[in-house]
Image (cartoon, grey):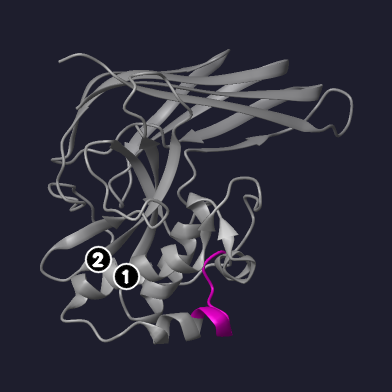
Amino acid sequence: MKLRISHETAYAYDHPIRNLVQSLRLTPSVFEGQRVQEWRIEVSGGIRGAAFRDGAGDWIEGWTVRGPTEQVSVRITGHIETRDTAGVLRGHRETVHPLTYLRDTRATKADAALKALAASVDAATDALDLAHKLSSTVAGAIAYRPGVTEMHTTAAEALALGEGVCQDHAHALIALARLRDLPARYVSGYLHSTVDGQPHDAAHAWAEIHVVGLGWVGFDAANGCCPDDRYVRLGSGLDASDAAPIRGVATGTTAGAGAERLDVAVQVEEIGQ
């Protein structure tokens, strides 16, 4: 599938900031399931700094914006070709050992309810079968409903609520997998979720579970499937915060502390062969 992606993140500040330093994980992963044809990252007033591929195989770019400024925008435009690998992350180079992803974070730390849910999953024929069953269990326990959770909601809180968004499904699945001794991590990216050819909001997240002998396999509990050619993978981490596409620090304002406002627009559309 050939996809056109447009992603803009706009920051507005009550008072002009003096300096902004950002770390961007906004370049598609390199593996057999996707091939970049064109990709551009632009930061308004930004100066591109060092760039490198980290141990997880993600491409990281540093950017600096020198103020004073009240607005900063990060814009990504690109074309990418994808193909279905049944969720398996084939050909992805990384050096971090899979067992690193057994470590809990605040967002994925299991409470009694998550432990009981993990224990309720029937014995599986193998690790891959167990991963599929854990994903189905999360899908049944947390209904998809936008707006009921926020970015700092934990897996335990989402399970107690019984509702959430893709971030919550990913965190809960990661928690359950780790409880069953399967390394798991959070993945950020895009999803082409319509077939009408029209642009649509498409930022997305899912989980990857490591299966010995097969490697990392993606599971999207929110949609009850493994990632296919509709998905574009950007990067991964222990949780949503660790895998954030944009991380940054504003180092000062010209008139004391002020609020930051954030607007995000993401569109993905299929283009002709």
Q: Secondary structure at mark 1?
A: loop
> x, y percentage for residue 208?
31, 58
Residue behind mark 2: 210
Residue type, label 2: His
Q: Cα distance, mark 2 to mark 1?
A: 5 Å
Residue behind mark 1: 183
Residue type, label 1: Pro
What span is colored magenta in the figure? 107-114
Q: Secondary structure at mark 2?
A: strand
Q: As rendered, which of 100 and 173 lies closer to the eye?
A: 173
The residue located at (68%, 25%) in the rendering is: 19
Q: Is residue 18 above or below residue 92?
A: above
Q: If you read the primary sequence from the N terminus, does the residue marked by circle 2 or circle 1 appear first?
A: 1
> x, y percentage for residue 265?
54, 24
The residue located at (80%, 27%) in the rendering is: 253
Q: Main secondary structure of the magenta part?
A: loop
The answer to whether marks 2 and 1 mark residues whose Cβ atoms lie closer than 8 Å is yes
Q: Is residue 216 above or below residue 212?
A: above
Q: Is residue 94 above or below residue 160?
A: above
Q: As rendered, which of 135 and 64 lies closer to the eye?
A: 135
- 109 falls in the magenta region: yes
Image quadrant occupied by the N terminus: top left
Can you tell which mark lies on residue 113? Answer: none
> x, y percentage for residue 51?
37, 32
- 190 falls in the magenta region: no
Image quadrant occupied by the C terminus: top left
Q: Is 171 left, or right, of 1 in this rendering?
A: right
| In the image, farthest residue toward the front | 196
